């Protein structure tokens, strides 16, 4: 089964993106599951490399890397540009994508979950 997660919220200040990434990772461990995550709006900041957080606090960048290691993670190119993010700013496995890519991923998905 192919599941697409679309995340919109920033990495911190709300737990929606955190919970979406947690669920994507957990689902990827199930047999016969293919997971894709598309980050839009403020969620593109989840994939920013070099995040420094207080000890004991989750790191969204690390979570994106974990999901990318078992699935695919795409970031909205327009949203990245609006926030001054370049591909060199991203964690390993996170890739700049377009709305057309999201449309294709949506058409291929069996389920789409939006956070």
Image (cartoon, rainbow, N blue to C red):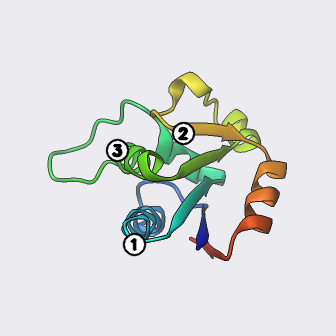
The image position of residue 110, as x and y in percent, is 68, 76
| Quadrant of the image occupied by residue 109 | bottom right
Task: Mark 1 or mark 2: name the one nearer the start of the chain.
Answer: 1
Q: CA distance from mark 1 to mark 2?
A: 22 Å
Q: Which mark is residue 62?
A: 3
Q: Nearer the viewer, residue 100 or 109?
A: 109
**Residue to which mark 1 is pinned:** 30
Q: CA distance from mark 1 to mark 3?
A: 20 Å
Q: Nearer the viewer, residue 25 or 9?
A: 25
Q: Residue at x 62, y 72 (%)?
A: 114
Q: Is residue 47 above or below residue 88?
A: below
Q: Are the two marked residues, 1 and 2, in contact with CB atoms closer than 8 angstroms?
A: no
Other residues around mark 3 within 10 Å, as few (<14) / some (14–19) / many (≥20): some
Comparing marks 1 and 3, which lies closer to the viewer? 1
| Quadrant of the image occupied by residue 96 | top right
| Helix, strand or loop at mark 1 | loop
Residue at the outermost top position: 88
| Helix, strand or loop at mark 3 | helix
**Residue to which mark 2 is pinned:** 94
The image position of residue 28, as x and y in percent, is 43, 64
């Amino acid at each position: 089964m192919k599941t697409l997660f679309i995340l919109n919220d920033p990495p911190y200040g709300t737990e929606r993106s955190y919970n979406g990434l947690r669920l994507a990772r957990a689902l990827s461990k199930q047999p016969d599951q293919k997971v894709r995550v598309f980050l839009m709006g403020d969620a593109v900041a989840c994939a920013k490399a070099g995040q420094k957080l207080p000890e004991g606090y989750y790191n969204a960048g690390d979570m994106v890397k974990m999901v990318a290691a078992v699935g695919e993670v795409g970031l909205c190119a327009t949203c990245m540009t609006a926030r001054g993010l370049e591909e060199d700013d991203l964690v390993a496995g996170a890739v700049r994508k377009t709305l057309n890519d999201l449309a294709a991923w949506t058409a291929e998905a069996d389920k789409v979950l939006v956070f």
